[in-house]
Image (cartoon, grey):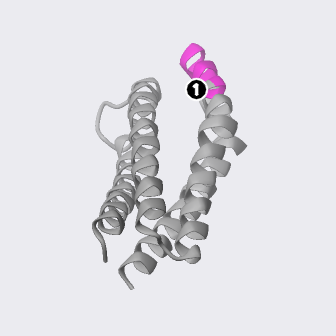
Amino acid sequence: MNHWLALAAAAIFLWLGMVLAISFLEAPLKFRAPGVTIQIGLGIGRLVFRALNICEVALAAVALVGVVLGGAPVSVFVALGVAVAALGAQVVGVRPALTRRSDAVLADAAVAESGRSRAHLVYVGFEAAKVVALMVSGILLLA
C-alpha cells in the first residue's frame, strides 16, 4: 500500500469511527441523561452534528485525494462515492428539514410529542448506508 492509500484508509476509518460514536452512541444516549430536556438535547445535537458534518467533509476530501493520487481500484471509488453521496444528501437534503423541525420544537416543546419526524428517519437511513459504504471502502483499501 502506498502512502496515499494509507492516508485514505486512515481518513476513512477515522470518519467511520466518528459517525459510529456520534450518531449511534452519543445522539441516542444524551436524551437519557438526567436533567437533559428535549430543548437542551436538541441544542447540543445541533452543535455536535454541525461539527461532525464539517469534520466529515474534511475527511471525505482527504480520502478522495488519497484514493485518486494513490490509484485505488474502482471498487474503492464506488464505495467511497456512496459514502460521499450519502453525506451530501444529509447535509443538503435532510439537515434543513431537521433544522426546521428542531426550531419548531425549541419554540414549542409540545411539537416533540408528535414523535420523530420523517426527516430524522431518512437521516438515520443515510447514516446506516454511510457506515456500510465506509466499512466496505476501508476494507477494500486494506485488502
Query: Residue 28, percent across and down?
Result: 42, 49
- Left or right: 136 as drawn, with respect to 97: left
Residue 59: image x %, image y %?
A: 39, 49
Query: Which of these two is toward me, 41 or 24?
Result: 24
Identified at 57% across, 48% down, the residue is 87
Q: Report which quarter residue 143 is drawn in.
A: bottom left
Q: Residue sitting at 28 percent across and 66 percent down?
A: 3
The reply, left or right, for residue 139 in relation to residue 114 is left
Part of the protein shown in magenta? 100-110
Amino acid at dot 1: Ser
Q: Going by the image, does 9 lie left or right of 88?
A: left
Q: Position of residue 80 (x, y in %)?
A: 54, 63
Residue behind mark 1 = 102
Above or below for 115 versus 134 = above
Check if residue 109 falls in the magenta segment: yes
Image-quadrant location for residue 7: bottom left
Q: Position of residue 94 (x, y in %)?
A: 66, 39
Residue 98 within the segment the image draws in magenta? no
Please state which of residues 37 and 73 is positioned toward the viewer in this rendering: 73
106 w.r.t. 34: above or below:
above
In the image, farthest residue toward the top: 107
Instruction: Label the magenta part by its dominant secondary structure.
Output: helix
